[in-house]
Every structure is written in C-alpha cells, then in structure tokens.
Image (spheres, grey):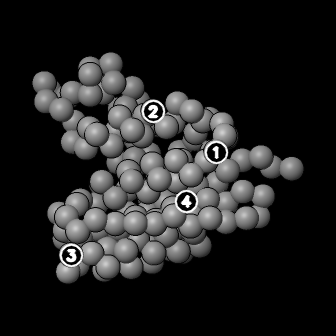
Amino acid sequence: MDETVYLYTDGACSGNPGPGGYASILVYKGFEKVICGGSPHTTNNRMELSAVIEGLKALNRKSDVLVTSDSSYVCNAVNMDWLKNWKKNNYKRKGQDIPNVDLWKEFDSLIQNHNVTFNWIKGHDGHEYNERCDKIAVAEAEKHKNS
C-alpha cells in the first residue's frame, strides 16, 4: 500500500498585499484532511508558504510527502536549491534578509522532519485538488476582507 502523504496547497490574496487565505488538503490512504486559514493583511507568497507549513504541521510522524503546488516560488525554493543557498547565507540575499524569512525558517525546519518532494503544476488548469484548494483559499481571503 502507498505510504505517501499527498499534500495539495494553494494561497490566495485579494490585492497584494491585502486580505489572504490559504488551503491545504492532505490525502493519505484515501482519507482527506482540509486545513485552511487566512490573514487580513498579507501577501500571496506568504499564503502559499503558509499552506505548505500548516499542512506539514498537521503530520504527526516522519512521512514521505509529495507536495503539489501551483507556486513556483515555493517549489523552486527547494527544487532549484534557493533555500539551501539562502540558509548557507544566513537567509540573506544581496546582504538583505530574504522576503518572508520568518516563514522560510519555519518551512525549512518542517521539511527537515520529512522526506518531501515538491511538484509544481500550472494553476487554474483543472487539477481537482488545486481547484479545491483555490476555492477554499479564496473563501478564506474573503472572510478577512473587513477585518
């Protein structure tokens, strides 16, 4: 039986910055868990990162995890070794803290606890879980419009 945890994620922001939301759907052995939330003043990149972070935080043991995201920002950070280089340079680029350094440190700590693979997909292209995550993330952003 497949022991992989499938983590589908998306973030949304109404304005950038503006009210935002994120959604994660964890799928394991046919069971699903939805995790979502948002913030009244944030950016799309923060919500994309938050979706992965919150999904990984929901795991209660070391796991093989396949993250599927439409965020090249998140996927490239790992797949193109940006994160490894940022870490080596104390989370700085060109002498300045990288944007969202707080989330990147938490993200890095969480991926160290699992065997994580990142799979980028094109957004709004009919992928069932990406579409579901998008709808949930947008609904979360809406909740924070008047906060």
Q: Which residue is mark 3?
A: 147
Can residue 125 be seen at all in this image of the molecule?
no
Q: Residue at x 26, y 38 (%)?
A: 101
Label of residue 8 in the image: 4
Question: Which of the two discs, 2 and 4, sits closer to the camera?
Answer: 2
Residue 1, given in percent of the width and then of the height, sits at 86, 50
Q: Residue at x 22, y 60 (%)?
A: 42
Q: Amino acid at mark 3?
A: Ser
Please tell me which residue lies in front, 2 or 22: 22
Q: Residues within 10 Å of mark 2 (few under 14, many from 20)?
A: few
Mark 2 sits on what residue? 109
Q: Position of residue 123 (x, y in %)?
A: 44, 66
Residue 97 versus residue 121: which sits nearer the camera? Answer: 97
Q: Nearer the viewer, mark 2 or mark 1?
A: 1
Tell me whether circle 3 and circle 1 mark residues in contact (CB < 8 Å).
no
Position of 113 with respect to 109 (left or right) is: right
Residue at x-position 23% and y-position 59%:
43
Q: Secondary structure at mark 4?
A: strand
Give the alpha-carbon distance from disc 3 to disc 2, as whole Å: 31 Å
* Of pointers 3 and 4, the one earlier in the residue sequence: 4
